Image (cartoon, rainbow, N blue to C red):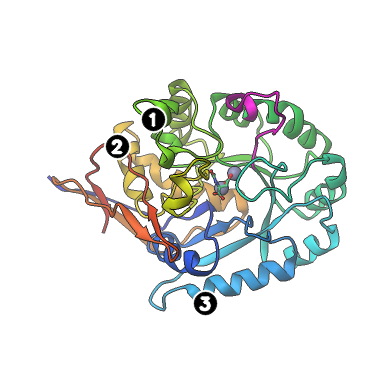
Amino acid sequence: MTQSLTIARPDDWHLHLRDGAMLEAVLPETARHFARAIIMPNLVPPVVRGDQAAAYRDRILAALPEDMSFEPLMTLYLTEDTDPEDVAAAHASGLVKAVKLYPAGATTNSASGVTNFNKVKPVLAKMAEIGLPLCTHGEVTHNHVDIFDREAVFIDEVLDPIRRENPDLKVVMEHITTSTAADYVKSNDKNLGATITTHHLIINRNHILVGGIKPHYYCLPVAKREEHRIALRAAATSSDTRFFLGTDSAPHVDAAKETGCGCAGCFTATNTMALLAHVFEEDGALDKLEGFASLNGPAFYGLPVNSDTLTLTKSDTATQFPDKIHGGDGPVTVFDPGFPVYWDVT
Ligand SMILES: NC(=O)N[C@@H](CC(=O)O)C(=O)O
Ligand SMILES: [Zn+2]
Ligand SMILES: [Zn+2]
């Protein structure tokens, strides 16, 4: 039995491409399926100013294989010194599609992020005025807040105050991991959306910790209890246009994951669309996949839907995905869902 599904070509609204040899290794994995992606700015050093974003965009396009088409949608990394006028100019030129807020210390390469939220008020006000979205890594970093509670506390202590002060600011809650976050999105009908990753639709915290520690399932925000995974699935497959795909595909070489202090991030670019077809079919929602992966994101960002298409096919034999890709400085493990998948992109 062969089954197939054709959807408008998808976009990835949260992606890490890195730089140099890693960029060359991972870019084709995304460009093979996705037309566009919101490119995360957490390089070392971070992409803070418009000129840095323009240079990074050029490096991405230079790394793109000639037979592939892909449009990087650039972002700026918000710091306490970010100049509102630089942000406005980068937006006016069409270069930058969002600004990314990392609470300082929350995740990979976030040391230059924000500690004192009062210092970024002028930038946020400017963004609200010009209609430039804010993407958030939504976790507080205080030692006294349990890592499993950091997303919920961020909503109360940081996000909601920012949104009350700037009702016109468009906000994307990136890579949400809790029913609390999904409910917060649903209870606000203006200027708020959320991305959901592929891996958070598949794993809960047991996958990381039961039967030995599994570093390739460790990402931030860390996967939560099963009830939260189920809530994320319900949101993704609900046809609520406020939820859309942001894979957060975040490559790290195996040596940096399989070590005494391993990096956070799951690399899912290679098999994301096949895994999503599996997940949506399992939930009886294959007809909702196009909205989640191809329609809702462009609508939020005010961009056209891609005019080309992507076809997924289900066959009787399990699809063989590579275990690893070669990341220049070493192998990068491809996310393993832990079950056979019969879908593939054709
Ligand atoms: N998600 C992750 O676990 N890691 C991301 C950073 C991020 O998106 O928070 C990375 O850059 O490796
Ligand atoms: Zn993040
Ligand atoms: Zn990320």
Q: Nearer the viewer's eye, disc 3 or disc 1?
A: 1
Q: Residue at x 62, y 69 (%)?
A: 56
**Residue drawn at the location 64% of the way across and 51% of the way down:** 109
Question: Nearest the camera: 276 or 306?
Answer: 276
Residue 203: give x, y in percent of width and height: 40, 32
Q: Please state the extent of the stretch shown in magenta in the rendering.
A: 137-150
- Residue 138 sits inside the magenta stretch: yes
Amino acid on which the number 3 mark rests in the picture? Ala
Q: Quadrant of residue 1?
A: top left
Measure how far apart labels 1 and 2 are at the Cα level. Answer: 9 Å
Mark 1 or mark 2: whose residue is earlier in sequence = 1
Residue 94 showing in the rendered view: no
Q: Which mark is residue 62?
A: 3
Name the secondary structure under disc 2: loop
Q: Is residue 174 visible?
A: yes
What is the CA distance from the residue labelled 3 to the residue labelled 1? 38 Å
Quadrant in which the C terminus appears: bottom left
Percent x, y for residue 261? 53, 41
Circle 1 sits on which residue?
Answer: 207
The quadrant where ligand 2 appears is: top right
The amino acid sitting under disc 2 is Gly
How far apart marks 2 and 3 lie (CA) works out to 35 Å
